[in-house]
Each structure stands twice: as structure tokens, then as C-alpha cells.
Amino acid sequence: MVKIGNIELPDFPLLLAPMEDVSDPPFRRLCKEHGADLMFSEFISSEGLIRDAMKSRQKLDIFDYERPVGIQIFGGDEEAMAMSAKIVETVNPDLVDINFGCPVKKVVSKGAGAGVLKDIDLMVRLTKAVVNSTSLPVTVKTRLGWDESCINIYEVAERLQDVGIKALTIHGRTRSQMYKGEADWGPIAKVKDNPRIHIPIFGNGDIDSPEKALSYKNKYGLDGIMIGRASIGYPWIFNEIKHYFATGEHLPEPTVEDRVEAARNHLKWAIEWKGERVGVFETRRHYTNYFKGIPHFKDYRQRMVTHDDPADIYAVMDEVLEKFSTPA
């Protein structure tokens, strides 16, 4: 069993990564139903929360069926981070996560996300401010360092643990790599092997198959793994990995019926959460991924992303079932 504060997780849990414009409640619900053990919100600007920015506030929505769930915040100002943690606490998530890993320029240029990797003292102060402002467990997601010449995750892990974080997720790339090249899990394993480290250490980066998940589990000896991009349009990956761990065998690939059901539920839950207009619009980006690999699908996808009436979209999905389902 893995524990984050009072949160009990199964042995070697599978975590859903916080992904901007992806990890919202409908998507998290799908991943939960297909085996994710712990999930996080999209990252939320501490400044946006304090200004009462509507988009930031909506990202605080969590539901009991997805627990345990964490809310992730980012920022470069100690006072703002402390205040935003107090705001987060009011919606009663299971934990607060700090993003020190986002590599995108608009975040880094504000001295937040992976930008903080250039200033470990600031990272420690920001973390301490959050830990001291909430009674919830605080966790951190970060990267190996700023670039190849500055792999500082070993110092970061010790110092963040010392100020009170309860778990650490490490993406096996530097900020300068962005999402290119191969993730290096060797330094993550060294953090785990450090006798001073007693908090759970999770690895993130490039896990896209049950075989790779098992290989990395055995090779690096971490407490669990976080899965991001491989789950987009494919929430089945969590149960596929768990089944492979338990049996050494693969679950059957999701059928067209499974794919339609996932897309249909995603749209339904998005509409329930944000209303018809926004729900229809925000689900459009997912259809390509749900139906990836189906030949001659372009016309159906085009109709799904251009219809505004949910009934019309569901009708296209019914056509997909009729056209592509395997006869019994």
C-alpha cells in the first residue's frame, strides 16, 4: 500500500497526469472508471484564483465519484500560492499539488512551473508557503532540472521533503527538452534510492503500453507511475496495465462499441458539467483520439466536430456503430 498523508492507494498506483485542456471532470471520470487510482485537476493559476477568474474557479470542480483527487496550482509568488491553497481547501479535495514542471513559455516566463527549477530556494519557499497554509497533504510534480547541465532533482527532492511534501512526481525530462527525446528515469530511481527519502516517488514520461509500464516498474523500483498523453482518447490504458501486471496477458483492444460509449459518455458528462454549448465545443477535440485507427473515418469525424446539436452528434455515433461494429 502507498500512503500520501492519510490517503491510502493500492500497491503501485497508476496516476492520471494533470493536463491543460484535458484533465477536466468528464475526462477524469472516464479514466477513473477505467482504472486510474489518483487524479489531478488541470493546473490552476494562483493569481487567477485570487482574482476570481472564472476559468480558474471552474477548474476547482471535483466530484465524490472521482476521489481521491488532487487540485494542482502553480505560481511564482509565495503569498499568492498560500492564498490560493486556502481557496483550494474550501472545495475539499484530497490533496493539493504544486506544478513545478510545466515547460510552456507563458508559464515559465512568469517564474512559475518549470521556471522555478532555476531557483531552488524560491521553489522551497513557495512549497513551504503552501504547506503552512493548508491542512491537506501537499505534493509536487516537477522535472529533472532546467537543462542537461542543471540536473538538480536530487537536491530538490530532499529539500521539498524537508519542508513537508507528502509525495513527489518526477517527469524524466528537463525543461529545455519540453516533450522531446526520451524520458530518462535513471535520476528518478536515484531519488527513490536515496536513504533520506521516505515519501512516495512517482515516475512520469513515455509510459504508453502495458509492457513498458511493467518494464519500468521492475527496472526503476518506484512507488507508482503517472500517465499523461497515452490516456488521451484511450482511458482503457489504466486497466490494461493492471491486467498485464496481474496476468502477463493483454486485455482485448477496445471495440468500436467501447469507443463510441466512451465518446458518448464524454459528451454527455461535459454537457451536464458546463452546459450544452460549451460541452459540445470542448468535447470536439477528443473525437479524433477516440476513433484513431478506424479506416475511412474522416467524414464521420468531420460531422461530429461541426454539429452543434448533441442529438445530431449522437446520431452520427449511431451510424458509426452500424458501419464499423464487428458482427456478432
Image (cartoon, rainbow, N blue to C red):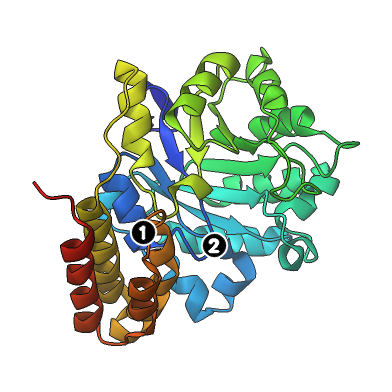
Q: Quadrant of residue 78?
A: bottom right
**Res 76 → quadrant:** bottom right
Classify 10 Å Cα crowding around label 2: few (below 14), some (14-19), many (20 and above). few
Which one is in front, 108 or 122? 108
What residue would you read off at disc 2? 20
- Residue 188 spot, x, y in % from top left: 67, 26
In the rendering, at what x and y percent does residue 153 appear?
75, 32
Q: What's the residue at 66%, 45% (across, down)? A: 128
Residue 327 visible to an observer of this rendering: yes
Residue at mark 1 to residue at mark 2: CA–CA distance:
21 Å
Quarter of the picture containing the N terminus is: top left
Asked whether the viewer can see residue 119, the reply is no
Q: Is residue 8 left or right of residue 55?
A: left
Q: In the displayed image of the protein, which residue is found farthest to the right?
A: 149
Identify the amino acid type marked 2: Glu
First-in-chain label (1 vs 2): 2
Give the labeled residue for mark 1.
Answer: 291
Q: Residue furthest left?
A: 328
Check disc 1: other Cα within 10 Å, few if <14, some if 14-19, many if 20+: many
Is 315 left, or right, of 5 in this rendering?
A: left
Q: Secondary structure at mark 1?
A: loop
Point 30% across, 54% down: residue: 29
Using the image as rendered, state which of residue 105 and residue 215 is in the foreground.
215
Q: Nearer the viewer, residue 166 or 233?
A: 233
In the image, residue 132 lies at what x, y percent? Answer: 59, 47
Q: Secondary structure at mark 2?
A: loop
- Taking 4 as reference, is 100 above or below it? below
